[in-house]
Image (cartoon, rainbow, N blue to C red):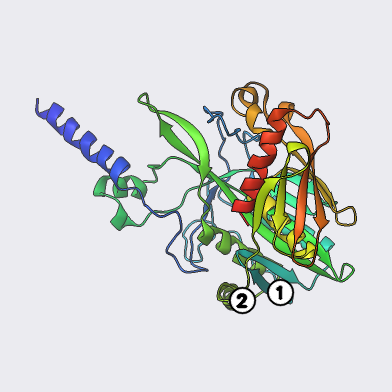
Amino acid sequence: MIRTYTALIFASLFLNGCISNEPKDNNSKEPLGELTINYYSDKSVNSLEIPPDLTSPESQKSFRISEYVKDINEQYISFSEDSKKASVKIKSSNNTDISVLRNGQKRWLLINKTPESVWLLANEFFKQIGFSIKKSDKKIGILETDYLENRPKVPGQSMNFIRAWLQSIGQAYTLPTIDKFRVRIESLEEGKKTELYLTLSSMEEVVSGAKGQTIWQNKAKDTSLENEMLLRLMMYIGDEKAEAIEKIMGAENEVTNRISANVSEGINGYAKLVFNSDFLKAWDALNWSLDQINANVQDKDLQEKAIYLKEVRTADQGILTKLFGGEAVSMNFQLSVKSISKEITEVYFNDISEENETETKQYSFDLFENIAKNL
């Protein structure tokens, strides 16, 4: 009987720690430059039950970092300077003129290097951390990693003593979070300078239903982590740490007019997106928002004033993507950007298949509303 009561008390304390003591804030309180990032490079992302509006990460396993860096712990890659685990050195000896620019929520780098040089450095940076490259398209300037598991360390005061003890012996006590990063590179001054945009996307495994099954769902963006990775990338390209931090914090203090857009009905019942800005600002804002929503950009042409996407319509998400995968039911669409005046730019949704289906028209509104929300 004593053993039974002891087991019940232990289980109660353990469950209480797992359920009631989770951190409430997605964004770390650590100052910029001090955030510990532990990416689990030798971790398989198992296929779990996926919510109807999501698809599972395509890669079942990221490559092993030891193929690229010697004497690295296969299990964890830590960026913490005082970490006892093996660390990846990310500082480059090549000094580079880097500026951090901001317009509303947009934050990006202006680098005094050619796009080709920046492209190679970005590739090397993420491979050194342990990410595999899922998409690499120089034509449209998009580099995208696959998902990798992130195991942040939760401060001891936020856990009960059992969870703290589990952490001390290296046991996992939280469900996985996986991150991926997207880099978009734009050429400036006839290829003499480069703009670089970095975007973080995360998913988390959560318990769903009484049987304790787990599913993957989108996780709110951790802006602290995104800024931290931007800082590490700046250091890798050539900036000193203190100087890079000052640039990022200074950019955060800038205040500029935010670009917004409204959704209305356009041609033939498809959605239309109306920006309150000139063409170039609208073009930049549109590309920024497509980064934020992880749009599958296939091609873009500034002279043609068009962006081509390959996406799954809202009506086809869920059971169809679960059975056949997103690629099997994806469709091609064109976003045509037209300057109306110095203060108005419109974006039209075109269905390349020309089947004129009701489901496609509804998806055009869903897409444009999502774009407007993420400007």
Position of 190 with respect to 255 (left or right) is: right
Q: Position of residue 312 (x, y in %)?
A: 69, 33
Total residue callouts: 2
- Please identify the residue farthest to the left as the structure is shown: 1
Callout 1, which amino acid?
Ile
In the displayed structure, would residue 154 be above or below residue 324?
A: below
Q: Quadrant of the C terminus?
A: bottom right
Q: Position of residue 2 (x, y in %)?
A: 9, 29
Residue shown at 61%/43% (left/top)?
147
Residue shown at 74%/44% (left/top)?
266
Distance, label 2 to label 1, CA atoms, is: 9 Å
Dot 1 surroundings within 10 Å: few (below 14), some, or many (20 or more)? many
Residue shown at 48%/32% (left/top)?
215
Q: Determine which of the numbered discs, if any, sits on residue 247 in the image.
A: 2
Q: Determine which of the numbered discs, if any, sits on residue 98 in the image.
A: 1
Residue shown at 70%/68% (left/top)?
109
Which type of secondary structure does the marked residue at label 2 adopt?
Answer: helix
In the displayed structure, would residue 236 be above or below residue 272?
A: below
Q: Position of residue 190 (x, y in %)?
A: 90, 68
Dot 2 surroundings within 10 Å: few (below 14), some, or many (20 or more)? some
Position of 128 with respect to 189 (left or right) is: left
Tag 1 or tag 2, which sits nearer the N-term? 1
In the displayed structure, would residue 110 be above or below residue 340?
A: below
Q: Quadrant of the N terminus?
A: top left
Callout 2, which amino acid?
Lys
Q: Where is residue 58, by image quadrant?
A: top right
Position of 309 with respect to 252 (left or right) is: right
Q: Is residue 67 visible?
A: no
Q: Where is residue 211, by image quadrant?
A: top left
Q: Are marks 2 and 1 in contact (CB under 8 Å)?
A: yes
Given residues 242 and 330, the one toward you in this image is 330
Q: Where is residue 56, by image quadrant?
A: top right
